[in-house]
Amino acid sequence: HASRTQIARGPRRTRHAACKWWGSALASRAMTRRGGRRNKQAAGFAAATAMEAAAPTVVAAAAAAGHDDDHVAGVCDDSVEPLELCAVVKVSTVHATPNFASPWKTSSQWSSVGSAFPISGRKLLTNAHVIANAHLIHVRRSDGHKKFVATVQSICFECDLATLHVEDDAFWQGLEPLTLAMGLPRLQDEVAVVGFPDAPSGGEAVCITQGVVSRIDLHSYSWDSKLLVVQIDAAINPGNSGGPCIDEDGLLVGVAFQKDMDGSHDNIGYIIPALIVWRFMECCETEAWGFGSMGFSYSLLDNPSLCEWVGLPPDLTGVLVTSVEATAPARGLLEPAMDIVLAVDGEPVGEDGTVALESPPPAAASAAPSARRRCPLRIPLEWLFRRKLPRDTVHLSVMRRGLRREVELSVCRVAPLVPSDPLDGERLGTRPEYLMVGGLVFVPLTEPFLTEEYGRDWDGCPARLLHLALHGKVEHPGQQAVLLSEVLACEFTQGYEVHRRRQVLRCDAQSVRSLRHLAALIAGCREPFLRFELAGDHIIALRRDGIEEATRIVAGLNQIAQHQHLLDSRDFLSPIGASASTEASAGVGVGGPNAV
């Protein structure tokens, strides 16, 4: 590391000598890693000999260039810190989590520590969960003592990444951005994780842990979205989140973000690979936000009888389409229980639903006895959709009734009926949605709401809500499951307390499609009574001419500043720049979010 630093910073003669010394060290280290036991011992001795022999050359070249003794000693002294170590930043965040059950409130403030590092464009890259719901963010360089205020520039919970902006020029002075790797690391590649993990007594100094790449696979991220991850055996602890994972060449191969909390497994940590970081940065620069999804479900064709029934020849493999999302572009192009997906973007689909993550070595290299064979990894075919931006296209090879055809399919971003990230990753400074009518409080059903009400494991959650969360399907763009979350005490709504936590199906005989749609139906009601039909065949009726006064009284008693907070409807399948959906044109007051 000291020599690599000298290569970058020293004069030409010093750089030439250091390059020779560094090259000898790298070659010997490679032999040490890859050879057998005897070869490793010999290579280790050769490495020591090469370094010892080359070190005086480096020192002499530096001295001839006019450097003093301290500078010359720094050429071969391990005390010189590498670039990636100096670039790591400590992130201290004060959070206040929204209350999804009572959306006009927030939780008590709490603090956390994470890590970040600079990238091009004077930005800091970190995890989204490190700065989620931040009220105040301070950053401190690993080689400094001063804290600087940072603000969130962009955030995406789907890939658990965010960028921070620091206004003060003094923070950026001499801070070099890290270089992102262009591809995936190889299994058994050595990596180092750099960050500020919290020690039991409180850690302040930067910490480095080393390990190797153990696995590359699809895995759940913070908000249960499945994306590509790299598993490593280097220690990742609270506070490491957002820190860089560096390979032997000093390139950024990933961002630390998770560890296996199951006590039955040891040394399992996860990093967000550089491919996902590149995609996130592309999202920040365009309006196509998020990661693509298939829009259809499939079944494996690993049973001979099933293959014969659908007409799959023995020499082909693929998966059977079983359902298509109602709002997905695949609707009308793929037929459930009839179409077999044979290949995606030219990659054949195996009978286990996987595709090759990496291409096998060329035939010429395979024929050479001394060539190092590289076994291609396989990964679920979802990755070929997830790696693309919404509205990109994929090419499918499909077979139906023995006839093969090519289908060009637009990649979509289908939001679940009960989202885990209800505010969307691209919204900044927003609060949960709610609508108060008299003493009735309506909210969209979300996973954070269920966690708020029934705990992390949703113990005691009613079966009807659990079914919506696990199996609910979106039937049209922007659809939400609207819930009567609370009935605040007042004479106007007395007797309706027993209907808390029930889904609102219809308002004035019209199906409720979203919270914003419900607000539009209420505003457009001209009947003497406003009627709500709830799940379980329950009905609520309110006298229309008394709603406004009752809402004002209840809001005052409960110190609620606004009787509603609605977000702009987002149709992820409509063209960028298109007008909002019909609910948005109803003229209901909206608290405007700052979208990236």
Image: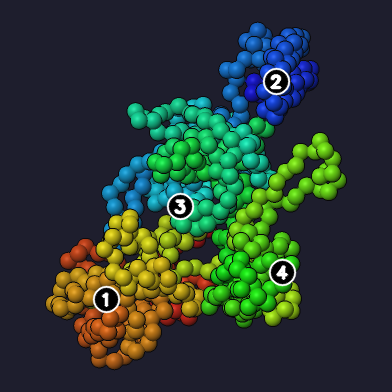
Contact, mark 2 vs mark 1 (Cβ under 8 Å): no
The front one of 67 and 207 is: 207
| Residue 38: assigned label | 2
Residue 208 located left or right of residue 402:
left
Q: Which residue is mark 4?
A: 314
| Residue 222: assigned label | 3
The residues bearing labels 1 and 4 have C-alpha atoms spaced at a distance of 62 Å
- Looking at the picture, how far across and down is residue 505, in whole percent? 34, 81
The residues bearing labels 3 and 2 have C-alpha atoms spaced at a distance of 45 Å
> Can residue 496 be seen from the camera position used here?
yes
Foreground: disc 4 or disc 2? 4
The earlier-in-sequence mark between 3 and 2 is 2
- Looking at the picture, how far across and down is residue 509, in whole percent? 34, 89
The earlier-in-sequence mark between 4 and 3 is 3
The earlier-in-sequence mark between 4 and 2 is 2
Question: At label 3, which amino acid type do we have?
Answer: Ser
Residue 278 located left or right of residue 443:
right
Question: At label 4, which amino acid type do we have?
Answer: Pro
